[in-house]
Amino acid sequence: MKAAEALIKCLLEEQVDTVFGYPGGFILHVYEALRKSPIRHVLVRQEQAAAHSANGYARVSGKVGVCIGTSGPGATNLITGIANAYMDSIPLVVITGQVKSSMIGRDVFQEVDITGATESFTKHSYLVKDAQEIPRIIKEAFYIASTGRPGPVLIDIPSDIQEAKIDFSYPVSVDIRGYKPTVKGHAGQIKRAVKAIGESKRPLIVAGGGVLLAHAQSELQAFVDKTGIPLVHTLMGKGTLPSKDKHYLGMIGTHGFARANRALTRSDLIIFIGVRVADRAWGGVSDKALQNVRIIHIDIDPAEIGKNVGTQIPLVGDAKTILPEITAKVSRVDTAEWLNELNGYRNENPRPETGLVNPKYAIQLLSDKLNEDAIMVADVGQNQMWAARNFEDRPGRSFLTSGGLGTMGYSLPAAVGAKFAAPKRQVVAVMGDGGFQMSLFELGTIKTHQLGIVMVLFNNTRLGMVRELQSRNYGNTYAVDLEQNPDFIKLCAAYDIPGIRVSDNSQLQEAFDKALKHNGPFLVECMVDPLEATL
Amino acid sequence: MNRHVLSVLVENQSGVLSRVSGLFSRRGYNIDSLSVGETEDPKVSRMTIVVRGDDYILEQIKKQLNKLIDVIKIIELDPRQSVFRELALIKVKTGDNRASIIEIVDIFRAKIVDVANETLTVEMTGDEAKIEAFLSLMEPYGIAEIVRTGLTALERGNREIKNQRKYEED
Ligand SMILES: Cc1ncc(C[n+]2csc(CCOP(=O)(O)OP(=O)(O)O)c2C)c(N)n1
Ligand SMILES: [Mg+2]
């Protein structure tokens, strides 16, 4: 059989049912094989969206997301989506076409060195040189993408290789001698962790995206319930513990809650779980503040432990297996006094009403209306923080956003992927007027598939987050004005997508009710004061 | 900034060298030299990498290298228990000093591998100190060209890298 057909067979072996892509000359053999297969191909309107949709699909389905593009510009358009997935550790298999093997290196039409270009932000990549290797490579790619610390794996396939004939047999197992992720925690370190927890007076859990990637929410809940230790989370860790839990203190970081950030500086034992302690989460905490703090760091990636913050008790492994081990051995910590202190901390006071839509209130209202298993996908900017700070986490709910790369234009295509992964769950894409315009073209995909996505657009006629930074740091604003925005309602109408413009809080109820009841895509455009603050 | 010598087993595949060197430049690690060649197993190459950095940097280098799928094993070589060697080819301007240059070459047990009317080319193997000493003696005569392989190294005794444990499990 042709290698392209073998490739599709491999995808079926990996239980792939949906791929996001965009065709072109040097990937046509693959498309021809795809056409004859039961796999659903979702034609996006720009390759970056294919990667973001695969990302949303992966995060909601728990499977590896797959996207496909052609060589040259198709491949380079995928780059932002690959980098985005790398930064957030999202498992993707990215397949690109490449010019003929014999032409590589001659700068022929639509040739680009995509494995070279993406080297520093793929978990691994392959430039296929022998068609017979395709089954092994695909098997390895899915294994590498989804195990250990997940991430994107790129497979670049020259067109002559796609066409070559091979004998197909799918490997049953993978054995890569240089890749053996540690899953089980070190028994000695677990003992030390248990002891440190027993000795602490003001312990604090910092939960990150790793908990979600490990699907370890219930293990975390059990750990919290048994020990009584309060929890803060990073942006990527939103959804690790329900907001209503009495141990829940909220999000930390630059745009986190004052109470959660304060807890960090008052704790005597910090337990990082699946956190890389990145600058946006941690920037404000000085080394001095940590002088007398003990740190337990649980992560599947040993390179993250000790990278950004020193650790006394490193624990490499999968949170899903390590947490129950600790929970079994640990006893309840008397945190009553500590919780009492924490409950005394106040969060920042929101700005008074502006007369336009209050985006914080809007998200709270929407959050209350949404189902127990709703998915919110937030873009980047002020809208992201309004969403993250006001969407209530409940068991079964999902909150997706671009954390590590902060990629504007993420939410609309990621929401597309989320909806394909979970057609029965409500999917809301929260966006700013800047970010919406970075992925507007996906209205085409949404229209084609009549995807029931509620788009909540916070139109402040500004690149609001940058506007705020500039006012604060330069006392001025520059190049952030979007006063000439198009009429977004009309724009959606061009795609037969209905919408409502809401210009004050009183109209929100009705608009959201209508949007949520509507069978198909719907836009709720909320007019927001340009000076509205993030916090 | 201490100097460390890492011996790294990698898959003998295209792209590996680029991944390893790319990692060093991207993360801003200082690299003194890198030499690479096939091993007793043709599917495996061995790199000797000389790096500079404090304990934190060294730890990060090892961990980040280890994350590369093509990296099979990393060990740090202890200078007291390892043989360090480098090969240098040095083209020296002879002028009227041919005899005294040859005398020094002999003392260093180096080899003359090419003779021309105005130059001598010397092959010299040794550890870094020996090569540096030789170069400083050649300096006054006038060095036309130098090429060095970078350090390559092996542990003394019966131990083999493939029987050693991966660093993080130590
Ligand atoms: C692709 C990309 N380009 C630029 C930025 C820098 N940036 C961060 S937030 C922001 C403003 C976003 O404006 P908008 O989408 O309207 O959201 P708002 O902050 O107004 O809610 C910009 C330009 C980015 N994060 N991503
Ligand atoms: Mg805006």
Image (cartoon, coloured by chain):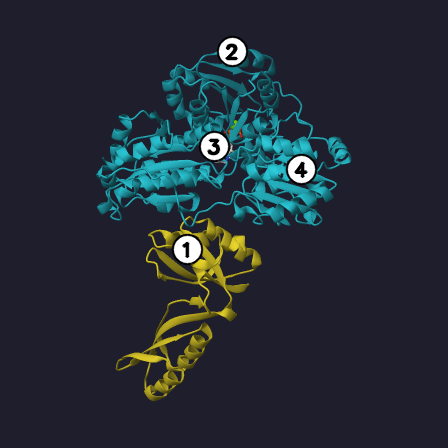
Which quadrant is the N terminus of chain B positioned in?
bottom right
Q: Which three-letter amino acid code belongs to the residue tagged 3?
A: Met
Q: Colour of chain B?
A: yellow
Q: Compute the Cα span from label 3 to label 1.
A: 31 Å
Residue at 53% across, 53% down: B169
Disc 4 crowd, CA 10 A, few/some/many (<14, 14-19, 20+): many
On the image, numbered disc 4 is attached to which residue?
A261
Q: Give the numbered dot on residue A408.
A: 3
Residue A231: image location, x then y, percent: 65, 34
Asked whether disc 2 touches disc 3, contact meaning CB atoms under 8 Å apart, the reply is no
Identify residue type, mark 1.
Ser
Q: In this orientation, does residue A240 appear?
A: no
Distance (Cα) linking label 2 and label 3: 27 Å
- For the residues beneath circles 4 and 1, the answer to whether they share a chain is no
What chain is tagged by disc 1? B
| Residue under pointer 2 | A514
Q: Are marks 1 and 2 on the same chain?
A: no
Q: Which mark is residue B21?
A: 1
